[in-house]
Amino acid sequence: MTIHPKLPTNPIFVALDTPDLDKAIAWSEELHGHVGGIKVGLEFFSANGAEGVRRIVDLGMPLFLDLKFHDIPNTVAGAVRAVADLGATIINVHAAGGPAMLAAAREAAEKSVTRPLVIAVTVLTSLDDSDLSVVGQAIPARDQVVRLAQLAKSEGLDGVVCSPGEIRAIRDACGDKFKLIVPGIRPNWTASSDQKRITTPSQAHNDGADILVIGRPITDTKDPAAAAIRILEELGFCR
Ligand code: C5P
């Protein structure tokens, strides 16, 4: 029997963008109980591999393993099986890999003992309309995002990663149950850094985000736990 993971009530997944395992563990321990989960990505995985992921999972918080798989269906299915066995709660693949690849990813997740949520990446937020046109995609980024979200939904994926400005359009197109994972979150008391399309935690939550991916507003502070608590309070979670 497969178990479908439930997302935590606390919607904050803190992005630990570091190759340093000790630092990631220290942050995770400090934030335990104040965030709903941890997100690590390619930088962390390339430096620390499966063993590093196990060390984070062992700390007992849900893990979003942000590796954005994009390959032929058979290879993606194998990669999904491998990371599902590590105990990740959320994994992701590029929707542009197409219907067969998305279906292969979902089927591999469904067959694993701890069934992770499989989330699609639509159009990277680093790409604008002119970048898409250079790679031969003539339709506007916003339309391509909705199109790929609908494709992911039709192949049975659990949701998408999207920018704050895309939440409402995807919610309208894909319905209430489709999970929306949203980076680009900035409380109004922090710097926007390199993020361009940003919104506050409350606005994203009110617009319908299920998970708020927040990195530097928490990790680049002297007291990460205090920053996470302040965001939670702004979201109306009383502690
Ligand atoms: O520090 P910050 O809050 O900007 O971190 C956001 C996290 O979300 C980073 O790990 C970044 O790579 C990720 N992300 C993003 N925009 C996307 C997809 C992922 O900022 N479109």
Image (tube, rainbow, N blue to C red):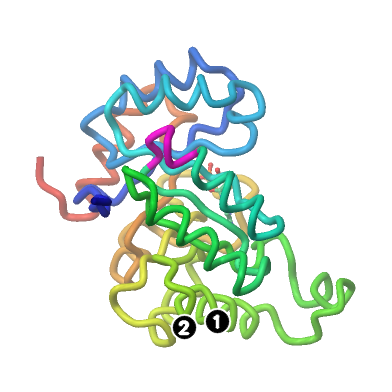
Q: Give percent across and percent down for residue 166.
A: 50, 74
Pair 2/1: label in front: 1
The amino acid at mark 1 is: Val
Whether residue 18 is in magenta: the answer is no
- Mark 1: few/some/many CA within 10 Å (<14, 14-19, 20+): many
Residue holding disc 2: 169
Q: Residue at x 61, y 51 (%)?
A: 68
- Residue 185, quarter of picture: bottom left
Q: Give percent across and percent down for residue 126.
A: 71, 59
Q: Is residue 145 above or below residue 196?
A: below
Foreground of the two, 218 or 72: 72
Picture quarter with the C terminus: top left
Q: CA distance from mark 2 to mark 1?
A: 7 Å
| Label 2: which secondary element | helix
196 left or right of 224 in image: right
Does the CB distance between marks 2 and 1 fall below 8 Å? yes
106 left or right of 29 in image: right
Residue holding disc 1: 146
Q: Is residue 18 above or below residue 137?
A: above
Main secondary structure of the magenta stretch: helix
In this picture, which residue range is highlighted in magenta?
83-88
Q: Residue at x 36, y 72 (%)?
A: 178
Q: Is residue 136 above or below residue 235?
A: below
The amino acid at mark 2 is: Ala
Q: Residue at x 29, y 33 (%)?
A: 61
